[in-house]
Amino acid sequence: MKKRNILGFVFAILVGLTGCEKVIDLKLDNAAPQLVIYGGLSDKVDNHLVMISKTYDFTDPNRFNAVSGAKVIVRNEEGNTIEYVEVSGGVYQSPKFRGQSGKKYTLDVTFEGKIYTASSTMPDKVPLDSLTFKDFSFFGKTSTYVAANYNDPKGVQNQYRYILTVKGKVEADAVSEDRFDDGNTIANVIFYKLDDLVSGDTIDVEFQSIDRNVYRYFYSLGQNSGGGGPPVAPANPPSNFNNKALGIFNACSTSKKTVVIK
Amino acid sequence: MPITKRFVLILLIFIGFYQFAFSQDKFTISGIVTDSGTGETLIGASVKLTGTTTVGAGTNAYGFYSLSTEEGVYELSVSFIGYKTIKQSITISKNIRQNFVLSEDNQLNEVVISAEKRDGNVSNPQMGLQKINIREINNVPVLLGERDVLKTLQLLPGIKSAGEGNSGFYVRGGSTDQNLILLDEAPVYNASHLLGFFSTFNSDAIKDVSVYKGGMPAQYGGRLASVLDIKMNDGNRKEYTAEGGLGLISSRLKVEGPIVKDKGSFMVSTRRTYLDAFLALSPDSSINGNTLYFYDVNAKANYQLDDNNTLYLSGYFGRDKLGIAEAFGFNWGNGTVTLRWNHLYSDRLFSNTSLIYSNYNYVIQNFVEDNNFEVNSSIKDFNLKQDFEYSLNNAHNLKFGVNAIHHTIAPGKLTATEASSVNATTYENRKGFELAAYLSDEWAVSDKMNLVYGLRVSGFSLLGPGSFKTYDAEGNTIGVTTYKAGEFVKNYFNLEPRISASYQLTPSSSLKTAYTRNIQNIHLMSNSTSTSPTDLYIMNSNNVKPEIADQIAAGYFRNFNDNNYEFSAELYYKWMQNQIEYRSGTDLRGNSNVEADLLYGDGRAYGIELFLKKRFGRFNGWIGYTWSRTQRQFDAINEGKWFYAKQDRTHDLSLVGIYKAGSRWSFSSVFVYNTGNAVTYPNGKYQINGRTAFYYAEKNAYRTPAYHRLDISATLEGKPGRKLQSSWSFGIYNVYNRQNAFSIDFKDNADDLSKTEVVRTTLFGIIPSVTWNFKF
């Protein structure tokens, strides 16, 4: 458990003892739609994806607000390029290829005459060894959580991203770094309660090694959603794109484990 | 800085001139003013001589006064709010040492806020000052019956609560870390318990509370926005007494008495919460093994060696502890010790020497075996102060002194066992040294005009050992230098001129104006919207510059109806430089490169504060209203445009009413209303990896819903005349159950993921309380 969770827990007690939550109406001003670019490539031989969308009004139903007709090109340091082709609205897919660790990749998205550029360096692979389950009880209520087990390489600054999918739906998208546990065997608990699983349900964890900027983006995104801790003044997470595009370009090395509940 | 240089010169010329012109044929009357019942010294009592000329002075923080005047026969009066005035004729033909003992006057029902004398608010050149009379603080209703100095302060204009039930406060657009909070001169770094819901100040142990919102006298320095000067009780010099209370949340006990009768006394006051006692009753081991409590102890002793020498020793120790059995523990607290020596060099020269130790630390422990760890972090000060007060003549009162503070900040020591995945690490300690000297003169220019002018000179040095980085504007490291122990890493030097003037228009009205510059060399890093015990302190460095605030203020003060009604209107404008904000995604935990994530900018704050108080009678109370603005400007935030600081609140209104019905019952009520805080809300949304994310177009462009609340309380005093005196206090917080927003969150509806909803969290609805207090 990290400090943030402890503080969050204290707040949860206080809110739980006396607090009360209610859904309210709030009038929010709608800003002009902004371009959002999300995606990248990994070290897996795959059709990699870049998703391009625009922001939309807060009161609208949630959707992927696709942006079609963009030109999406990834290039490496040697100047070789790969074009991502739109396969469905706003979804741009590469031919099958794999990225290489240690290499810097640059994404250029050309849309309505403007070029949006971001770079990301693919970190060395850190394999996910296994998933284990852990129980924690807070004030008499026990919940089960999944932990990602891996060996952190010593002497290197590493950042990781964990994407937890439960029954086909992404339920947690969290990041960590090795500032406090460099070079050790790690069991990092993903704080999403797995209480209602039945036999046959699957959960999987995609485990990415990400560069510093990508880490910072997702760390900031997580701060905005609060996670029950003391409220943090929200802000747009720091994107690696120029020209005020939102989102992140992520060149990562990745591994994945799946568990079927017995 | 030619202006400040000229200022010093003028100061020296004035003092020299008056010394020369008026120092002949003067005699001095001086002494101590105390309470007849307890022997406690009285702070701010007024001593006045009326004859061919009229001279007056207030007692200082140690109850000492000194007046110089020509030979003659005078009418002497000694007065203090809530006490019977002493009036006598006195012949002054030599230097006189005369102590006065005042007895309480039970006929007066002065409300909580008291000026030192009946018309002191009009005649005193000091502005921006507010005082709380601690003896009557229990008249004001508070959350859960825990009477609280800091929460009562928040009912005054210009002082705003940092949040629902929070003891943190904002003064004139400043942030919570810009308040200098002193307990018997020792700075208290974290003045709250239980994440802000209770202040660390147990009102049983407190004698005097003064808060300066502007026009700070030159003896105070180190923070931008305000000075909260709290003085503890000395202890009863006459007899042994005990008092205490049983409340819903906590119990208190205070014991005091003479060490040697009329020579020395002690006071020990303790408080502890017992929420954890209820947890222990649970049969469930996962509940009864948890801890959640705080305690504090205030202790003080004093001894008068002889007429010219008195020693004081005071201390505060408080701690919050919370933990989950076998999972984690978390505790934090302050400790302060102040040793003081009052010495009279002559009837005119009063000296106080203070040696102060102040410490704040926190410990986090994780007991889960495979990633167990313990974090220790602290800030520790050693502080030496030498203050002099010199009564030059009937027109000039000088204060001067020096102050040296040595800071040690230990950002974190991380320890763990072999079995843990966490690595033991120690972050470099940071050491700093502050040195300040000041000189100020209170000058009665004429019968109508008073002037307080002075200068504070402050220096700060960041000291080795350690390696120190310099960052560019983007936060990239551009240099690293290693220093040995005691080497200077960086020095800053500042001049802080202070001047305030009052002009008495009529006997019951005056105009005042003030200019103040304040410097802050130590800064609290907190990127959450509320403060937390783990917030990080940093000092000036290669990257962080001293925060600077310049404030001008002007006010009109008027009393009506034989000083029964007091009115004031104060206007202020404040410029702030070198303010600190964070890049988005800044992680303050164990971050030795935190300065790479800081942004620097400017601030401005302005407003008007109106205050009307009825001071005496069965019914008394006050109305405080503030209209204000506070904004910040950072090149890297909000496209460089000015934005509202989170503590910006346009309107802030407090109504306090106290009614004494008969001899035993009293009733009181508080109503507060303020505009919501400036916050950032989404202006759109999008999806990242299939999950909803929000787009923010402008910083702090929205307001949380307006905050308002009504509290009531009733106090029943026991029958008078008994040995054991007791009283019952009943209170209701938030009578009409207003659902004030503690936070507003945006999230997808759990049942219909296509919808995003706005969720308001309310912390306190209607909450009743009862407390039993006793004294014997």
Image: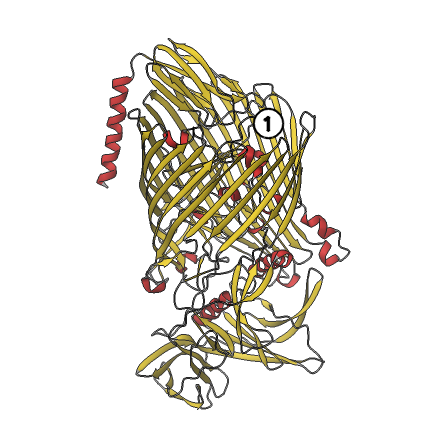
Secondary structure under the numbered disc 1 in the rendered image: strand
Rendering coords of residue B205 (x, y %): 57, 34
Q: Nearer the viewer, residue B718 or B451?
A: B718
User: Where does the image place residue B142, in percent across and percent down from the top left?
Assistant: 58, 44
What residue is at 69 percent from the left and 59 percent from the top? A139
Q: Is residue B464 visible?
A: no
Residue B283 image-quadrant placement: bottom right
Residue B305 appears in view: yes
Specify the subunit that label 1 lies on. B
The residue furthest right is: B283
- Left or right placement of residue B458 versus residue A205 in this view: left
Q: Nearer the viewer, residue A117 or B7?
A: B7
Q: Quick one: label 1, few (<14), some, or many (20+) residues within 10 Å?
A: many
Note whether B344 is above or below B61 in the view shown: above
| Vertical order, B622 against B578 (above or below) | above
- Which residue is tagged 1? B266
Residue A22: image location, x then y, percent: 58, 65
Residue drawn at x 30%, y 27% is: B448
- Quick one: A48 or B555, which is closer to the camera? B555
Residue type at the position of mark 1: Phe
**Relative to residue B658, is residue B716 drawn left or right?**
right
